[in-house]
Image (spheres, helix red, strand yellow):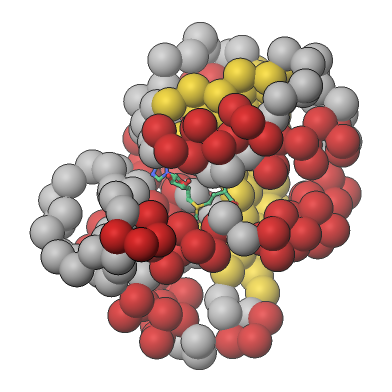
Amino acid sequence: MRRRSSLHGDYPLFSTNSRKGKDTMLMNSIEFWAMNNPIRGLIQRYYEVPRLKRLSRGQADNILEVGCGQGVGARILYDCFSPRKYVGVDLDAKMINRARKKGQGLANAEFLQGDASSLALDDESFDLVVDFGIIHHIPNWQDALTEVHRTLKLNGEFLFEELSLETWEQGIGRPLKKILDHPYDRMFRQREFLDHLKALGFETETYEEKPVGFYYFWGKATKTR
Ligand SMILES: C[S@@+](CC[C@H](N)C(=O)[O-])C[C@H]1O[C@@H](n2cnc3c(N)ncnc32)[C@H](O)[C@@H]1O
């Protein structure tokens, strides 16, 4: 495995098959850089969150963010939804450390290291769960969606932005596939993700986009049972 020690020593530079079959995987250093870049935060604040908020009820007392990354999303979610409590979970201890620093001063914000497919959180404890493009990182993604359903209150909302197998089969996704490390052999198609949500008891509203040839989908799922 090639590593770039000068940047973020624990993140492999390019994709590797060595993690095939495992149920968790961290980002490689290329994606780490892309996700810890100020531009990522600006896109989230001025494009992604306002658009998701317009789909939602626009108010949530208790928010869970799965794969909170560097914690930029937390501050934006506070600004947009004014929650009384927020929990951000990320698999990567380094991301949690960054998020705790960035999240200082946010009232009742907690950042926990954990696996979104097996959360140490109570049933039906959140009004809103947010996924800014992390579930495609999880080989056992069905378990992550089950956890979203379990931790959401009835009528609670799940706001998501996701990449899927379609992302890597077209446009700029093809070359990106070669340099990003994802569990492609166990990744969902968009239809599978939405069908799984439906089977769990969600009603969904979904949109697709392809800016500069990069395919992704986003939307809202409401827990109806
Ligand atoms: C593409 S980054 C997105 C980070 C952030 N949500 C954003 O939009 O900037 C994916 C994040 O998911 C985290 N992650 C990957 N697998 C995870 C899992 N099983 N449980 C929780 N977090 C996970 C990674 O550590 C990383 O921080």
Q: Is residue 71 above or below residue 218?
A: above
Instruction: Give the tally of numbered discs.
Output: 0
Q: Residue at x 60, y 49 (%)?
A: 132
7 displayed left or right of 22: right
Foreground of the two, 180 or 220? 180
Q: Residue at x 31, y 54 (%)?
A: 9
Q: Quadrant of the N terminus?
A: bottom left
Q: Where residue 110 appears, x then y in whole percent?
A: 61, 19
98 displayed left or right of 212: left
The answer to whether any part of residue 129 appears in the image is no
Q: Residue at x 48, y 40 (%)?
A: 95
Q: Is residue 81 above or below residue 31?
A: above
Q: Is residue 168 above or below residue 135?
A: below
5 displayed left or right of 54: left
Residue 23 falls in which quadrant of the image?
top left
Q: Is residue 27 above or below residue 60?
A: below
Q: Quadrant of the C terminus?
A: top right
Q: Where residue 212 appears, x then y in whole percent?
A: 64, 86
Residue 120 falls in which quadrant of the image?
top left
131 displayed left or right of 163: right
Q: Where residue 13 appears, x then y in whole percent?
A: 30, 68
The answer to whether any part of residue 59 appears in the image is yes
Foreground of the two, 86 or 208? 86
Q: Where residue 186 appears, x then y in whole percent?
A: 26, 57
Residue 211 falls in which quadrant of the image?
bottom right
Q: Residue at x 68, y 20 (%)?
A: 109
> Which residue occupies the extreme front position in the image?
6
